[in-house]
Image (cartoon, grey):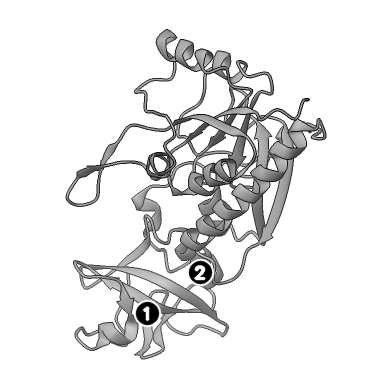
Amino acid sequence: MSSKPLRIIFMGTPDFAVPALQALIDGPDLVVAVICQPDRARGRGRKTGAPPVKILAAEHHLAVLQPDSIRTDDFFEHVKELAPDLVVVAAYGKILPGRLLRLPPLGTINVHGSLLPKYRGAAPIQWALINGEQETGITIMQVDEGMDTGDILLQVSRPIKDDDTAGSLFAALAELGGEALTDAVAQLKKGQLQAVRQDDRLATGAPMLTKEQGHLDWRRPARDLHCLIRGLDPWPSAYSFLAGKRFRFFKPLVVDGPVAEPPGTICRADKNGLLIATGHDYLLVREIQPEGKKRMSVQACLCGLSLPVGGQLH
């Protein structure tokens, strides 16, 4: 491959994709276009807002395309005219058609937030936490027409810490993704990347999350609930009901010990948090969000709201 800068098309939409695009902007190659999802209504006010990737692209005066469909002949011809050497995808949000994948001479590569073949799908970071994994990472892979089934080009791992949440891990892996992408593109240009086929027998799924998955079953062990709460923080968040009111729970800590009380019983409520009985061990919850209010420490919540010891969470 010559030392001539590559012509790269970048496809991505949310915050996770921003460091990857920034890495390409800072690199030696030329980003000829950025493709992202159309502007959407967001938040309680339902105001239309630009995706984070579009905002970054605009700051650097890059051409931005936001097609409603990437499967039309017109869109394909537009991309073809840009003559990309490489297409880079990071959380774009749709499966790409085969003719688009095959268009660039160097193919299409993806920045994925798991150590494939584990956690193929839309929510790999959350499911790694929910399932109590000890490590996760970034996979740079060739994109095919399946769901994260393409050959692996490069992987970088990161340990999962006990206080990691989906939010903190998203931020960490997004940055790691940008670094891994820089290495991958440099090696790809030199012909140094070797594609490794995924072992489908080791594959696990990471489907989209639903709000209902956050309803806590206190009969489960504290360790499982600890993982679930962190995996659903900040969205869709884990919750339970006390006297008919919904409470969302954050910043859990497992407290070992034999449990005498029925699961879901509030055993202690003080400045340290809520100590709650589970199916095995106790769970100390240090932040809470009462229905209709903001997220706060349990200590702050107790200043204006009763969380009675002996109360039963459902």
Q: Name the one closer to the observer, 126 or 57.
A: 57
Q: Is residue 232 above or below residue 87?
A: below
Left or right of 143 on screen, residue 170: left
Kind of residue at badge 2 = His
Q: Is residue 20 left or right of residue 36?
A: right
Amino acid type at image mark 1 = Thr
| The C terminus, quarter of image | bottom left
The residue shown at (46%, 68%) is 219
Query: Which one is closest to the eye, mark 1 or mark 2?
Result: 2
Please give the residue where the numbered disc 1 appears in the rendered image: 265
* Residue drawn at (60%, 35%) of the image: 110
- Closest to the observer: 23 or 166? 23
User: Residue 34's spot in the image, x, y percent?
Assistant: 46, 32
Name the N-terminal-most of marks 1 and 2. 2
- Asked if residue 276 is positioned above or below residue 57 in the image, the reply reads below
Whole-Å distance between the Cαs marked 1 and 2? 16 Å
Q: Which mark is residue 226?
A: 2
Residue 47 in view (yes/no):
yes
Residue at 75% from the left image edge and 30% from the top image edge: 3
**Residue 291: x, y in percent?**
22, 67
Q: Residues within 10 Å of mark 1 (few under 14, many from 20)?
A: many
